Amino acid sequence: MNEQVQAYVIKLLEQIVAGVSATAAFLTQELPLFVQEYLLFNTIWYWGMSIIGVCLFSATTYIAYKLYKVGQRERNCDYDLGALIVALVGYLISVIILATYVYWALMIVLAPKVFLIKSLVNLMR
């Protein structure tokens, strides 16, 4: 009986050592690569969304300008009001998009450790 317990304990300790060495191998080899890929993906994502915000800003400016020009030609105040509404709504949405995504993109570039910690905290919620 004593030899069976001893063999079981030895087998259990060998499994623990194998698990610890596998975890150490993961932390030293695969985790840094995963973190780099995660940061690269998020950098591309947030800067891409920031570019979409700039495109939205440009599009709303163009549409508002065209509406304003049509309103000047036809001397119709409805077009001027429409241009103002399009411009204000588009600018507001653009500012929200740019403020959010540029904040996160700059955090990734300037403080990647803070971004990783915030990402982990968001995953735990």
Image: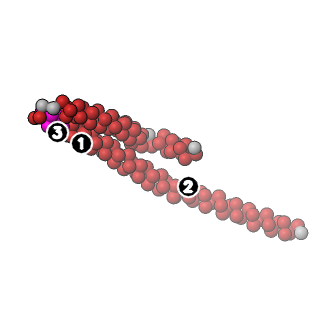
Residue at which label 3 appears: 66
Identify the amino acid type marked 2.
Answer: Leu
Q: Nearer the viewer, mark 3 or mark 1?
A: 3
Q: Earlier in the sequence, mark 1 or mark 2?
A: 2
Kindly identify the amino acid type of the residue bearing the numbered disc 3. Answer: Lys
Tell me which label, 3 or 1, sits earlier in the chain. 1
| Mark 3 crowdedness (10 Å alpha carbons): few <14, some 14-19, many ≥20 | some
Q: Is residue 14 above or below residue 103?
A: below
Estimate how packed mark 2 is, as few (under 14), some (14 to 19) or many (20 or more) residues with alpha carbons within 10 Å. few
Place of residue 98 in the rendered image (x, y in percent of width and height, measured from the top left): 34, 38
> Is residue 69 rendered magenta in the image?
yes
Residue found 48% across the figure and 40% down from its top: 114
SS for dot 1: helix
Residue 71 drawn above or below residue 23: above
**In contact (CB < 8 Å): disc 3 and disc 1:** no
Q: Quadrant of the C terminus?
A: top right
Q: Is residue 111 magenta?
A: no
Q: What label does residue 27 carry, if any?
A: 2
The amino acid type found where label 1 is placed reads: Ala
